[in-house]
Image: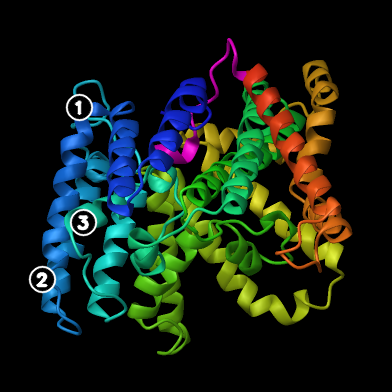
Amino acid sequence: MEFSNLYFLYIFLPLTIAAYFLIPKMRGKNIALIAASLLFYTMGQPYYLPLLLLTAFGNYWLGDRIYNKDRRTVILPVALNIAVLALFKYLNFFLGIFGITGADGGGVIGWALPIGISFYTFQMIAYHVDAYKGKHDPAPDFLTFLLYVCMFPKMLMGPIVRYNDVKDQLLRRRSSPRAIFEGGVRFCVGLAKKVLIADYAYLAYSELEALSYGAAAWLGALMFTFYIYFEFSGCTDMAIGLGRIFGFKYPENFDLPYTSKSITEFWRRWHMTLGAFFRDYVYIPLGGNRKGKARQILNLFIVWALTGLWHGANWNYLIWGLYFFALLVAEKQLMPKLEKLPYAARLLITMFFVLIGWVIFSHESLPALGNSLAMMFGKGSFWGAPVGVILRNSLPLIAICAIGSSVLPKWFSFLWGALLVRGRKESEFSAMQLIYAISLFLFAALLLYLCTASLVGAASKPSLYASF
């Protein structure tokens, strides 16, 4: 089930919230969240529920046997998690490398990828490694661990949450009226980003992909660039907002990545929890930059190859990862010269290479990828009347996307808050604070209404990252 599903919005979520707050004790609340999360997962892929429960119990049992600084006790659970992920996600890909395919030319194994497996597998790996490093004790019981693994707001699309960051919240947390209100507003903003912007950007992208003009390829690349940002950041906003409602504080995952002045900065702002995972559990253990330049480049190569493959078992994802590896290595050499350029020039250069990266990312077919790149750089006709029609129809959406991915909304939110409430004591509920709260409530209600109107009679596009 998707967050942008009317059944989720108006049946599942209200009933879950009601049950959660009607139950008085924390253990009962946790059981209610586990039940809701398992139901949420079952409504998407019921046949993989036993796999989820089995892997969760196996990880809990093995995690209880990890000893601080004893490497032998951590190798097995980490290896088993990687093996399960590889079995379901990469077996067909690696068999295909050796020419082993099914009768129809597709994969030998016909099973579907368990939704969210890349996210919850990484969370369980982080759990074991951090326990080995002594950052936290094992989960006190299986139910606590299961809630950490399967909590529905973050299960399918992240952010990647580490047990050490939420271990206290799993046992002791409080949902204040303010946190519930702020979480609800954050959820509605994320829903609007997904339904009102990302879905329409993808629709324009799909129309442009069907045209054979250079301008269509460039405009399509721009629309996909906007689509993937508002899609994924919107889903993350919804997850963080839902977490706040239930008393959890999940880490941020995006920080205005399309305002970056370099590729390095872009990856510090995009999917931050994934970048932090590869940094802390792959790059640094491999030696990071401590063993010379050649070893650092090798470590970066491994990290970015894995980053590409994490997104999908296909050649375009591997090429996409290695593309950014090459850019980052080149940028480290050119940084002294790049830093002398004006901000606008650095921003345009960065976004050009990011846009090309999203072209690679968006084409799982290598011939189609080659054709799109060829059209962008001179193959065939550049302009056609259909491109002009789509461009005119998309101009308001492009303007909204450009503004929405800039710093302007953040500035406006800060100024509006500063005008009404910032600098005042929390204990003082003034008329200005009431106006501020009402304005946010009306804004969130308007977004929810517009999203509902958009979803009635038309299903939202399935979230891209839920399939990773």
Give the number of the disc on residue 211: none
> Callout 1: 10 Å neighbours few (<14), some, many (20+)?
some
Residue 454 screen position, x and y as percent: 65, 19
> Would residue 399 be found to the left or right of residue 187 on screen?
right
* Residue that label 3 marks: 81
* Residue that label 1 marks: 102
Lower sequence index among marks 1 and 2: 2
**Residue range corresponding to the magenta coloring:** 455-468
Q: Nearer the viewer, residue 466 or 249?
A: 249
Q: Nearer the viewer, residue 341 or 28?
A: 28
Q: Secondary structure at mark 3?
A: helix
Q: Quadrant of residue 304?
A: bottom left
Q: Marks 1 and 2, how far apart in space? A: 41 Å
Query: Do we see residue 114 in this rendering?
Result: no
Q: In this rendering, is residue 287 above or below 22?
A: below
Image quarter hosting the C terminus: top left
Q: Is residue 412 magenta?
A: no
Identify which amino acid the numbered label 2 is placed on: Arg
> Would residue 149 be found to the left or right of residue 100 on screen?
right
* Residue that label 2 marks: 65
Q: Marks 2 and 3, how far apart in space? A: 16 Å
Identify which amino acid the numbered label 3 is placed on: Asn
